[in-house]
């Protein structure tokens, strides 16, 4: 393993490099470095070197989402080039170019999402958002910067009150924000023109995995037939779901929900704290990605373009 | 005004007598006392005395719900008797009997609701409840006492966390309770067999006015087609809605939602805190009252039986 | 037949007396006159006289709606009194009182509907209405007179453009009106807070029969979950539907839809012009009557109170 | 116990008297006989005698539906009369009249349902029916006798193939019948104008309990928004559901579903055979009773008229 | 700029060339001419020349839809070839071929749509159409020419009565047409087997932008679960919506809706006249294009094939 | 025609080779043999030979589904290679490779579907299946082999009782199976976590054509919002539907539905026996193919990848 690549791997491992986008870009650049420095004398040898680096990188953070996707993106193009029997030189170039495309795309992703999504916000719109998503907020902030007068309802987002951060960010931009309890979503929904949220992951059938409560907001939005818009970088789309994997819904500590002392008073009960829920595609009007706006069912097209129809062996073992 | 009656009025005024049921019964008994002690020599005089007492009672707590309904219940029968030209003696008797019917009905109401509603809970059922309603809890507790093995999901019910009290009450009965954030309602709904909630008021068209978030739970229940059951004493049915009055949704202090210090950090935002929402009748499968189980649209039948088709003049001025 | 009664019958026949409310009141007063002037010496004879008058009145305008309903209202009470073996004097009184109740109710009906319905319009509401209904307009005008700032979208209501009249009436009151094509209903529906329409008839199951296009507006309102409110005098509720009669949907002349010259140019086509359509009860939130606000399914309760469970023989032959 | 009454009780017990309608009428006539022959000298004594007879009758067939309802109908009027302090003579008369009303209503019930329901079938209609209901078939046959050209799709109704009997009955009347598998219901539903079925029971909230598969037909009808009409004598409405009782869904022998030999070949599996299912009121457009056509939610009104708001004690112990 | 190309540009500008298809083909042929006549000596120079011509063409009619799409189609292939470093000769060929593909596709588009769509019309079908779309009518006419017996309901399509033209066209073909008011759509929908309409534009998420009222017809069709089919040339699919642009809904003069004189009589009202509305993808069963039949969500696949994932810079500045 | 190829054709013709997968693979291998043995001296000649073989193969079983799709898959790549002006050698290689891809994909298809689909079954799930599909059963069996405790409800699937075979297969694997009448689907649906069925064909818009009754199960699953999952090899996706062809729904003999003797007793009725029905894409959550899991609307993407946008001429005449 090249030292520079190893250093990147360790920085990801030690969480020195963090954040979905930053990790994705670091992994891609490690692969580009591997390619550039390779002294392989045959395509086969080169492919071997690249897969070694890929495996090393993926192993650093087994539960990250953007990390394996970034590696898969580059490795897919490596395999294609290899299968097309590109010369060693062309193959390297092809791989390096793939890394650059991913890096560039990732760097611009949130800005592009802000740009595309903001056009769908109209003068005078009232927007509801749930939790605290940089993609969703970028859409709102961009629309505000375009001079559109907008109003935002931010849910407090129990149990961790991410709505407080959302309120703070928007308020600092000078945007008119109202903070509400999650329970009040349906009460206010008739005043809302659009709902805009982010994504933790998008499944192959277009389902959205996002902060607990998102699917309730989506249900309320569907009842009054207003657009429910998701901002999501394509790196969030999950190729594992193509081969049938379900996205695991983590259950987080009960102490996020209730103070131990209060719990003691209540007596013997259980406290359940799932952190995400699944919003089915029929409740989603569009997903704004850095490539463009798609219907939720377009998820499979994005996945196919980025990763092809990988088998589980290709997806996980590389 | 008779002294005893005046004392009851003052006790209601000073909140010495409190609780929807207790107030209702006190008012009815004050009217019965008025009737018993009346020295009127003609029916006209007697009606006048009764209406004076009625007005005095209603004036004590202008925003209570059960108070005017209790008075209206008795006065309706006073008017009917008067219109039917009952003799003075019969009229008094008729009024006293009306008071007794109301008092007896009110005393047994929650027990009867528990008895009727519990029969609809089946062995092994998992029930979700929202907020903390004595009628809803009576149904659950009665089913538990019948030896049925049941499991309850209680929402925490922001902003005031009434779900903690609900959890405590049920846990003390030995019922298996899981406390969840309101946001997790749709996540857990596929495990739920029935939703059971209480009522702040029932409108003439069968709509339910209840703690904020109730209508979101109802929406989630509707999506998976499970029964959404309301426990409500008939005294909660609102005759004002027959003449078009909307039930006012109180907005409570923002400090229930957020701590002032946290708010200061967030910056300039508004905090909205409506305390109730409206669940439309099409999301309600049945309402369990002390008279019996009815479809939500049966509300108008209950109202008509209890109060007749009063005009606004009759309803408010008496 | 008494001369005065005969004169009323002729005035209805010759359309000297017209308008649903006026006809209903004339018929009831003719029955009261019959009762007052009756020289019958037995209850049987009196009932015979009354039924003769009833038949004579109904025969005057076989297709009117309010006419037979008014007569049925009085005759129902005649039969009840006769069955209860009231003395001849009491029976007369009973009948006369029934007539007076109907007349008084009818006189106040539109005003009461305006009063009750207007309370459901809130400050700042935008209302959509279809066709030109005095009950619906009374609701809107009353709300406006209460000082509420409201805005109205009036559909033009092809083929006869009754929306022009609606616009004129509301505009004269100083209400902000926008006239739109019927086709634009769904385009504007997201700006609408409530839909308010009138009724030609209400069926036993709560279905609304009203001007063609009403059910499309209801469908659009349902899609965005806003209240769809019907203003309807109880005389419009159809007891025939209790015994299974379908309300006939008249097809009116094609010349209302298209100019003969234009038709000639088009060539050989058929032009269909049904004048009413049926809005199912699940699209109706409430019906505002002069007795009070009811859910559509409360229709059967209104019908039972006014007419009882008549057999077809009782309904049509009297 | 009077001998004649005892004989009737025994005939019901031994199933010499059978059929929901016949049993109901026999029970009512036994009560009338009891009243007529009573030698009681006070109202109290008379009430005691009547209740004894009522209990004897109900005990004959504990699971019948029409039997207790018939008895309850008469006893309700007995109690009312007693509470109104009618003279002994009047009380007897009142009870006898109640029995006669029930008997007459029951005798005419199916015919009246046929008469009312048939008016809702239009020339050229295609009707679907499930299982074999005399009320539903009476509607179809009456429409056919009125000269309307109709076509019927009859489901075969597994497991017992009651659709064969339905097909035979209709075919004998000269009606155009197509027999289909239950699985083909949705395939043919777009050709259907109305669905008409019978009822085993109607619950207080308007839900229909009927032959297994009925609710699937209702779901298919709802998807294409065609009327789903139920023919049901009022004696089928269940007053037990007012006090929260669930209607028991009997599970019948597996041998109705599969031949023992075939089952042996298949191996170790379980066979489930519930005989009824529950159709929720929102899938029912109207219920045709012998009193008239009602919305499903009108069930509570029918029940209240027939039985009042009985407590469980009144309902079951009498 | 080549003279011939300039002439084409001017002819588009002066509307000498008009009609979406004709403009698209003229623009593509102008680009082919530019390529053929190019004397560029390097690929870079050639690309520059082509982009100049593309910009000139697009500038001629800033609001046309098919014009920029045609140019984008060719320029996309120019860019791809340039990026793939094709030789100058191959690049020219590539561009010319792209133009020819577009022209040929456009020429055959309506015929192919007629061919494909007609297969979905079955013998005896009754079809509803709204407004006057050549693609929709081609489907109907082709089915008719195949000897299928069909019946058409044409809405009059207020405010401009394009339904008259539709009726005329179909009537001339010998097709059985009924003209109805837009208000009667839901009245007749139960007689309809399929709805077929055209498109002004198709958005990236599959939404249809078409003549005002289209979405109401779609809603009515959805209620009874009949297929709602759109005929749309792929040139109508809007790549702008990929980058978030909303399709502008033009509001046309009030004088289309109401005669000035009538308006004067009515008084001070506003008249609103939006010309299009948006039908969401969930109300569309399929879109028939000249490439084939797709689900509405297949829109993104069509757009990606024709234009790739362009950035706004690439889309608008070229 | 090569002898070996001719023999394969005859074996398909005579049904010596049968089963969708086996036929598809035989046809592809016949094309590979044709390519390998070809003595053509030019690409044109080679294409001619290949098309002759293709036509011969397709003619053997005009109604099979997998046969023409297999041939189209190879011929598409032949045409592409020919259009790309590959050398004769490369063209042959290209065609042979295409055959091999198809064969390999087909061999692994059911296993892959089992692998991918099984991951979506969770510990403790209760699954419903209809009819007897190898793809659906593979999913269930694979999940069982993974050690997950699952329970299956199998519908009997009238008229041919394929549910008996399904029960037998699953029971042999040791899976807990309950057999139910098709009528009981909605009764048990609230106990079901997922529905899994197979496919006879998938249309371009994502609609599923499968055994009669499938769409009723889908409707019941939709009502309670549980996943409805289809297992389908990509060879089942129908490219004919791209050009508008409707999939013919075969009506099978009435004798499958009823015994002639029973029918004779019933009298003159018709018996209808359609063998498939169409489940619209909005009732399908995902389709599990051997390539991966897709939303139903991803059907068009699969079809485009496998067959491109063929014209009817290309699809049917080759």
Image (spheres, coloured by chain):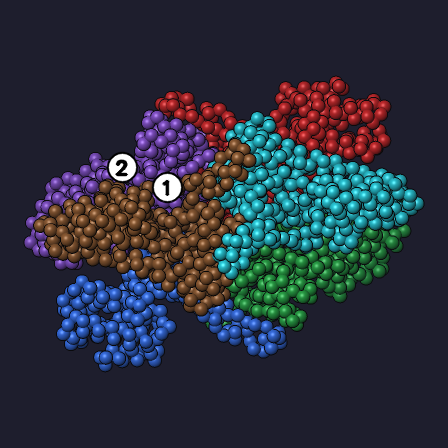
Chain colours: A purple, B red, C cyan, D green, E brown, F blue
> Which one is nearer the viewer's eye here, F150 or B246?
B246
Name the residue beneath numbered marker 1: E248
Residue at (45, 49) in percent of width and height: E214
Is the residue under label 1 in contact with that under label 2 (CB below 8 Å)?
no
Residue at (13, 44) in percent of width and height: A33
Name the subunit of mark 1: E
Query: So how many labels did they put on this image?
Result: 2
Q: Looking at the picture, how far across and down is residue A249, in whole percent?
A: 36, 44
Q: Quarter of the image for the C terminus of chain E: give it.
A: top left
| Other residues around mark 1 within 10 Å, as few (<14) / some (14–19) / many (≥20) | few
Q: Quadrant of residue D161?
A: bottom right
Name the residue beneath numbered marker 2: A111
Determine whether, in the image, residue D77 is placed left or right of residue F160. Answer: right
Q: Looking at the picture, how far across and down is residue B87, in whole percent?
A: 85, 31
Labels 2 and 1 within one chain = no
Secondary structure at numbered mark 2? helix
Residue A56, numbered circle = none
> Which one is nearer the viewer's eye here, F211 or E16?
E16
Residue most toward the front? C261
């Amino acid at each position: 393993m090249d030292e520079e690549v190893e250093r990147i791997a360790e920085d990801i491992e030690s969480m020195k490099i963090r954040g979905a986008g930053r990790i994705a870009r670091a992994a891609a650049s490690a692969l580009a470095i591997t390619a550039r420095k390779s002294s392989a004398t045959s395509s086969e040898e080169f492919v071997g070197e690249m897969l070694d680096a890929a495996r090393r990188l993926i192993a650093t953070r087994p539960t990250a989402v953007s990390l394996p996707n970034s590696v898969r993106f580059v490795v897919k193009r490596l395999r294609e080039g290899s299968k097309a029997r590109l010369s060693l030189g062309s193959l390297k170039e092809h791989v390096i170019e793939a890394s650059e495309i991913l890096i560039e795309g990732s760097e611009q992703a949130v800005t592009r999402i802000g740009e595309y999504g903001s056009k769908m916000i109209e003068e005078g719109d009232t927007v509801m958002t749930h939790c605290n998503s940089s993609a969703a907020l970028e859409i709102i902030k961009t629309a505000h910067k375009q001079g559109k007068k907008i109003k935002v309802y931010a849910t407090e987002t129990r149990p961790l009150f991410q709505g407080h951060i959302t309120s703070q960010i928007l308020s600092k931009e000078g945007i008119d924000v109202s903070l509400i309890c999650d329970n009040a979503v349906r009460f206010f929904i008739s005043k809302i023109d659009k709902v805009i949220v982010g994504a933790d992951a998008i499944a192959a059938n277009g389902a959205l995995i996002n902060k607990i409560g998102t699917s309730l907001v989506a249900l309320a939005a569907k009842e009054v037939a207003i657009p429910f818009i998701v901002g999501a970088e394509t790196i969030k789309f999950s190729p594992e779901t193509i081969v049938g994997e379900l996205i695991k819904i983590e259950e987080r500590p009960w102490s996020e929900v209730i103070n131990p002392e209060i719990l003691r008073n209540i007596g013997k009960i259980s406290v359940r704290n799932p952190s995400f829920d699944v919003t089915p595609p029929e409740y989603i009007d569009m997903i704004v990605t850095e490539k463009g706006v798609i219907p939720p069912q377009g998820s499979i097209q994005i996945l196919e373009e980025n990763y092809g129809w990988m088998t589980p062996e290709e997806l996980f073992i590389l």
